[in-house]
Image (spheres, rainbow, N blue to C red):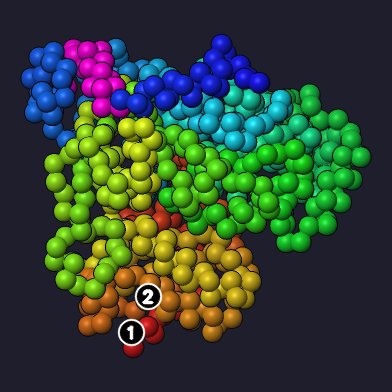
Amino acid sequence: MLEKMNGFTHQSVIDEFEATTKDAGKVQVETLGKILEENGEAEYLQKLGLNGRTDPESFKACVPLATHPDLDPYIQRIADGDFSPILTGKPITTISLSSGTTQGKPKFVPFNEELVKSTMQIFRTSYAFRNREFPIGEGKALQFIYSSKQSTTKGGLTASTATTNVYRCSQFKNTMKDIQSQCCSPDEVIFSPDFHQSLYCHLLCGLIYREEVQFISSAFAFSIVHAFRTLENVWEELCGDIRDGILSNRVTVPSIRTAISKILEPNPELADSIYMKCSGLSNWYGVIPELWPNAKYVYGIMTGSMEPYLMKLRHYAGKLPLLSADYGSSEGWIGANVKPWLPPELVTFAVLPDIGYFEFIPLREKPEDQELEKTGSTLNYMESEPIGLTEVKVGEEYEIVVTTFAGLYRYRLGDVVKVMGFYNSTPELQFVCRRSLLLTINIDKNTEKDLQLAVQASTKLLAEEKVEVIDFTSHVDSSTDPGHYVIFLELSGEASEGALNECCSCLDRSFLDAGYVSSRKVSTIGALELRVVHKGTFRKILDHYIALGSAASQFKTPRCIGASNTAVLQILCNNLVKSFFSTAFD
Ligand code: AMP
């Protein structure tokens, strides 16, 4: 039976996707035409002499590739209240704060109605494909979603994270209804000013509606893992609330208390049943299907910087499938996961050719590195001219460049993707990593992906002692001579000195970048230092970013802390348990 989505059927959404991807090249030309027609009056395009032309050749000839700092002065004028057509024909009235966790401070990016439309389009598309394979019934979704602080710019525009801007739109609610993804929790919980109270109440509502919950989700996998780590600590309190029908006094926000009081009633049977189930679990394995017997899957972005949380997520999910969500950014959406059955490690994103205009900068490893041992590093690239969506080649890596309906033209997103195949004529991309360097002292170059792989290798040693890595980050310590890498790990339990020493040397050996290895051999980079931090340290880091205006929904642990980020460095240093130095190159 075809279920209806607001006048659409799942099949009609799939058919639409099939049609737009059949001749993706043609759709791209039309999409660029539309973007340039709608925004032809924008000062940015006028200045570049496009003179109303909308064809790809003129566009590429007149408009240069841009990065955020190039566009920042224009965005700043918009934020300061200049309502003339600066980047778009229609004035921008809302600003998104991109997560910006790596740089330390959020970037401003334009947000408009078109972004809302494309968000709904991508949600519907991946849902239609997902539901074909993993159908869900009538019910609710336990969604760990949170709004961030909303502020007003100097010019009076609302500024919030992109997810918050989307959650506030009426279309969001309607689309969630259409795609059977209505959140268990009332709006007051989602839009709570206090993240911890909000999380507690999401868990509580999820338990109240446990029979109805069809799936568990969040924007990024981190938030799901974080939620279940919290459940491990608060489950008895939650049971108490359900037993007595009285909300814990840890929740103090009046609007949340009022909203929850409407759904919380004394229910000793439910409390007993949850208590029994939680008590019977072994180290919380399979808690999700145990507590939510009708859940069909766990859903959220699980790729890229979310991969380190997969092991824990699998542990909580037991036999329930993990379905990885779509690929996009505050700047705009890129592709949908239309093969939801693939495990998160193999997920690709089929680009929606009518959602924006996409170009790809081919990236090839630098020839000089090819003479050295295979580096495995993802950064040492030679760039060539950007190519179009349908010109990309399977197996090649590219930096993605977007032109959007929200005023970004030939904007370098900073992400590296690999083409794994084609869906009709649109490429299926795998997310590789952020392009920016994380760790570098002299000739060494390591990205987030390199760090992730090193931590993954060392994690295996700790697993032998049943100790898990809860979270990690890094830092270049240039205060020593020579400078050295510092890796911070928060662990789930105590590991032996021997294992930690070995883990430290393993981390050092796992950075395969030729520049790093040769510098270590001649001691122009010092021995890698492992600093183990107390349990709860990364929670404090999350709190720190939330207080600065980040949204928990969009949070990505910063994988490198620069010397200027003294607040976070201070948190890490104040929570040091012990440090170790590698002997890998002694
Ligand atoms: P934000 O600044 O919070 O909008 O984050 C956008 C960035 O998150 C993207 O540029 C990617 O680096 C990353 N991202 C978004 N979606 C995915 C995904 N599905 N897989 C991996 N990384 C992603």
Percent x, y for residue 305? 44, 51
Percent x, y for residue 526? 30, 78
Instruction: Say whether marks 1 and 2 touch (CB < 8 Å).
Output: yes
The residue nearer to you, when weighing 400 against 23, is: 23
Please state the quadrant of the image where ligand 1 appears.
top left
Q: Is residue 506 left or right of residue 562?
A: right
Kindly report the distance in space between the C-alpha atoms of the residues bearing marks 1 and 2: 8 Å
Q: Is mark 2 within 8 Å of ligand 1?
A: no
The residue nearer to you, when weighing 327 against 271, is: 327
Q: Is residue 261 left or right of residue 423?
A: right
Give neighbour class at mark 1: few <14, some 14-19, many 20+ (Cα, 10 Å): some
The residue nearer to you, when weighing 77 against 110, is: 110
Q: Residue at x 46, y 50 (%)?
A: 346
Tell me the element at label 2: helix
Specify the quadrant that holds the N terminus: top right
Q: Is mark 1 within 8 Å of ligand 1?
A: no
> Residue 459: which disc?
none
Residue that badge 1 annotates: 585
Specify the quadrant that holds the C terminus: bottom left
For the question of whether residue 5 can be seen, the reply is yes
Percent x, y for residue 362? 20, 46
Range of the magenta residues? 24-46
Is 11 situated above or below 498?
Answer: above
Q: Which tag, 1 or 2, sits closer to the chain's start? A: 2
Q: Residue at x 18, y 12 (%)?
A: 41
Give neighbour class at mark 2: few <14, some 14-19, many 20+ (Cα, 10 Å): many
For the residue marked with disc 1, what is the amino acid?
A: Phe
For the question of whether residue 330 can be seen, the reply is no
Residue that badge 2 annotates: 508
For the residue marked with disc 2, what is the amino acid?
A: Asp
38 inside magenta stretch = yes
Q: Residue at x 37, y 83 (%)?
A: 584
